[in-house]
Amino acid sequence: MKQTDGPVSVLFVCLGNICRSPLAEGVFRQAVRNHGCTNRFHIDSAGTGGWHSGSPPDPRSVAVARRHGIDISGQLCRKITADDFSQFDYILGMDHDNIANLRAAAPGDHGRIHLFLDLAFGRPVEIADPYYGGSGGFEEAYRIIREGSEALLEKL
Ligand code: 4NP
């Protein structure tokens, strides 16, 4: 889908950058590695809010990733910047609120902003925010992020 040379850059975005998008960054990175195409991608994550900037991911996200053989404990939360909108090919929100926040923050056109699972599956499925729930929500988020990551990789 990309027109120019160089790695395809993908930025996963949620509200806090401590639950869903760090998990998506770690899961997609592992999927890319498993398919032997690490050099073809630049992968990162960010939040539309900056309350947790500089913090590691939520311990429940770290734990669910670890249960599936992925270490995301070294990631640090950051807020999306104006430069991200021109530097990333794909800016992927987890839910419709993320998309609305991204569209409001984007300095230019919105063509790079997509709902992650809409791009992956061709259906506008949201990834629910697990922050206020129990650990089951994190396992469910992992499961759908895993499926979405495999589908996205096929697509890109
Ligand atoms: P995330 O979850 O957007 O998946 O990182 C949240 C994390 C923190 C908050 C909300 C959602 N919060 O309100 O602090």
Image (spheres, rainbow, N blue to C red):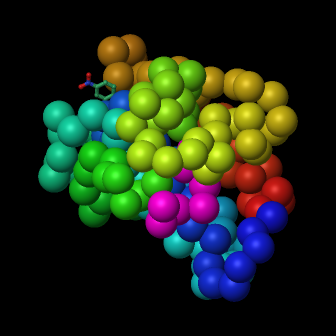
Quadrant containing the N terminus is: bottom right
147 left or right, relative to 134: right
| Residue 121 visible in rendering | yes
Where residue 153 appears, as percent x and y from the top left, is: 75, 60
Compared to residue 1, the image places residue 12 above or below, namely above
Quadrant containing the C terminus is: bottom right
Q: Quadrant of ligand 1?
A: top left
Compared to residue 127, the image places residue 54 above or below, namely below
Compared to residue 71, the image places residue 55 above or below, namely above
**How many labels sit on residues?**
0
91 left or right, relative to 49: right
Q: Residue at x 49, y 48 (%)?
A: 108
Q: Residue at x 58, y 42 (%)?
A: 110
Q: Is residue 91 magenta?
A: yes
Where residue 37 appears, as percent x and y from the top left, is: 69, 79
Q: Is residue 83 magenta?
A: no
Pick out the residue farthest to the top: 133
Residue 4, image quadrant: bottom right
Q: Residue at x 25, y 56 (%)?
A: 76
Pick out the residue farthest to the front: 108
Looking at the picture, tell me which residue is in the foreground, 126 or 106: 106
Q: Residue at x 38, y 14 (%)?
A: 133
Q: Which region is colored magenta?
A: 86-92
Looking at the picture, tell me which residue is in the foreground, 111 or 77: 111
32 left or right, relative to 153: left
| Residue 65 visible in rendering | no
